[in-house]
Image (spheres, coloured by chain):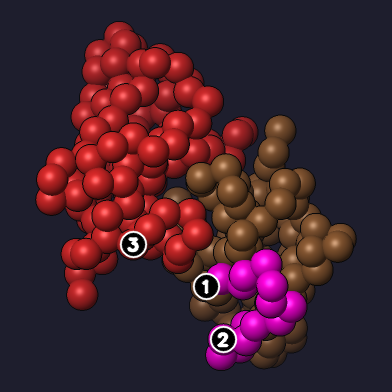
Chain colours: A red, B brown
Amino acid sequence: KAGVTQTPRYLIKTRGQQVTLSCSPISGHRSVSWYQQTPGQGLQFLFEYFSETQRNKGNFPGRFSGRQFSNSRSEMNVSTLELGDSALYLCASSRDGHTDTQYFGPGTRLTVL
Amino acid sequence: SQQGEEDPQALSIQEGENATMNCSYKTSINNLQWYRQNSGRGLVHLILIRSNEREKHSGRLRVTLDTSKKSSSLLITASRAADTASYFCANGGSQGNLIFGKGTKLSVKP
């Protein structure tokens, strides 16, 4: 069974730009969660999508948004990038969400200059 | 902050020794999950222990859970250089997402 894939793996943007990251979950998984990892704040939850609906949301500004498609693939978008958005963005898929084992992708390393 | 804490923050041992990492959490759990992360890469799921379980084994890994103390520990026996990584515990509680601790950086010297 193929694992969770994330594209692109690396991204360099400048302040003020926007970016879209993509995540393809494991086949049959309906839940996709996104996390931001930085050296200072560690791993922080962004949001979770389940069957195309946002089910949970973390404490991030509205510049961070996401969506999920009918095939469970998910995208997250960050608008008006700030230097502090530089991070490793990880997505995780599972059958049912946080009560289930989460399988993580390799992450997208975003650098904002 | 709801974040849990791992302790120690860093651990350096020799190959063949056992490594013990501890995790404390703040809010109630449905389960407690342990993950490994090799430098800057994705997280690899190691083990999930449910709130009604006290101990779980998987290969060289042993996890214990004490809900009265809101703590868990991960034991890696007979460690190998390949075990060098950061280890995170995550609270799979009722809030709908995993709450991660800050991790323990384990270094296993050959």
The chain letter under disc 3 is A
Q: Are marks 2 and 1 in contact (CB under 8 Å)?
A: yes
Q: Sequence order check: which comes first, mark 2 or mark 1? A: 1
Asked if residue A8 shows in the view, the reply is no
Tag 2 residue: B58
> The residue tagged with tag 1: helix, strand or loop?
strand
Q: Residues within 10 Å of mark 3 (few under 14, many from 20)?
A: some
Question: In terms of image quadrants, where is residue A63?
Answer: top left
Q: Residue at x 56, y 90 (%)?
A: B59
B56, A70: nearer the viewer: A70
Q: Of the residues tagged 1 and 3, which is closer to the observer? A: 3
* Residue A41 as seen in the image, left or right of residue B69: left
Residue B15 picture location, percent across and down: 67, 85
> In which quadrant of the rendered image does the N terminus of chain A lie?
bottom left
> The residue tagged with tag 2: helix, strand or loop?
strand
Q: Residue at x 62, y 72 (%)?
A: B49
Task: Quote the CA–CA distance across marks 2 and 1.
Answer: 8 Å
Question: In terms of image quadrants, where is residue B54?
Answer: bottom right
Amino acid type of the residue that numbered disc 1 sits on in the rendered structure: Leu
Task: Quote the CA–CA distance across marks 1 and 3.
Answer: 17 Å
* Residue A75 as seen in the image, left or right of residue A101: left
Tag 3 residue: A95
The chain letter under disc 1 is B
Report the magenta residues as a range: B48-61
* Up/down of A45 relative to A62, above or below: below
> The residue tagged with tag 3: helix, strand or loop?
loop
Tag 1 residue: B46
Q: Residues within 10 Å of mark 2 (few under 14, many from 20)?
A: few
Amino acid type of the residue that numbered disc 2 sits on in the rendered structure: Ser
